[in-house]
Amino acid sequence: MPQPLLSVVVPAYDQQGQLAECLDSILDQSFGGFEVIVVADRSAQSPAAVAQTADDRVSVLRLNAAVGVGRARNAGAARAQGRYLLFLDADHLVTPGAFLTLADRLRAEPEAEVVLFGHTRLHRERVWPGAAQAVLGGLGAAAFTPVERPEVFGVPAQAWDRLISRELWMDAQLAFPDGRYEEISAVHQALLRARRAVALADELVQLRRRQTVHPTASPGASEFDLFDQYERSFELLNGLSLTAADLVRPFLFRRMVQHYLFVLDLAGCVSRAERPQFFHRAAEHYRRLLPEGFRRPGGREGVKFSLLAGGSYSAFEVAKLTQIARTAVVGRTSS
């Protein structure tokens, strides 16, 4: 059997009963040069029985412990034979023709180590564009080195809206760490190590997650793992030249702060009792990792940056309650 172009790694965490639809969207692709590795561990969210399909492109890798999504992906990557790795979850759908689009792009740029592409999110019966769409549209058709286009570090670090060459994965000894938000440092390391990347503005994957945060992390994981993941990413900058690090740092910093504020804004993500501790951890990161000459964004987002930089949790909460009240008043006025 010839080497597949793509190895699609899918941890079998299927809390919402979507794995079969995910696999159908993969197997229905018009381009057939791929393999699928479904990784089933012993966690409660992984189905007790993951059936092997009659399609010989699909294999099931069974693990003997509950290891979480990061280690499951690592195990799938170690089994993979394709030239490129694509990490999906059960709540993803691959759009029709997506693999053919990727194959065509790689035929034009066979030396690409990372391929970035767009995605959409289905939420409350509406389809929303991914947060990286504007950046992807501005990267153009030519290949680039990620550290020379540092704006790619300013978008969410997802594992499922990009291909990573298996050679890069092995040479750089990439791996998803334990804990929640496991994608962040692994994706950033891939970008930092890649010498040649390409981008597609095409929306090739749809996320159907009902929860914003992936529910299946390694045992003992928590929302506070987010700080460790960004620590790892900033430590990676130490391996760059000063010029390259100075280019990347402001984009990575802004993305980090946006992520912390997003988690604080997301209802139920951090418990009420833990919110002050989470805020103060985020404020400490802000002060310690703040790049020289960094300019805060404007508008409401800039106000949130300022409140976090100030380090006063009570002021942050008062501002949030004030905004909620204003929004409620506007809603009543316009109704």
Image (tube, rainbow, N blue to C red):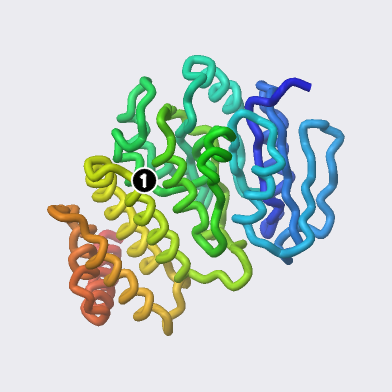
**Residue at x-position 27% and y-position 46%:** 245
Q: How many marks?
A: 1
| Horizontal relation, residue 172 to residue 56: left or right | left
Against 121, is 115 above or below? above
On the rendered structure, is 75 left or right of 42?
left
Residue 126 spot, x, y in % from top left = 49, 46
Residue found 18% across the figure and 63% down from its top: 303
- Judged left or right of residue 2, residue 139 is left
| Residue furthest bottom as drawn | 273
The residue at which mark 1 appears reads as 155
Relative side of 176 to 21, left or right: left
Instruction: Name the residue furthest left.
Output: 293
Q: Classify mark 1: residues with Cα within 10 Å, few (<14), some (14-19) or many (20+).
A: many
Badge 1 amino acid: Val
Q: In this rendered view, identify the residue nearer to me: 254 or 287.
A: 287
Quarter-of-image position of residue 273: bottom left
Residue 307 spot, x, y in % from top left: 20, 70
| Residue 318 point in image, percent of width and height | 24, 78
Tell me which residue sits at (69%, 26%) in the image. Answer: 4
Q: In the rendering, at what x and y percent does residue 85 appear?
A: 60, 36
Question: Is residue 115 or residue 329 the one in the foreground?
Answer: 115
Residue at the image point whose x is 49% and y is 59% from the top: 181
Location of the N terminus by quadrant is top right
Q: Nearer the viewer, residue 116 or 194?
A: 194
Q: Is residue 294 above or below residue 260?
A: above
What kind of element bears circle 1? loop
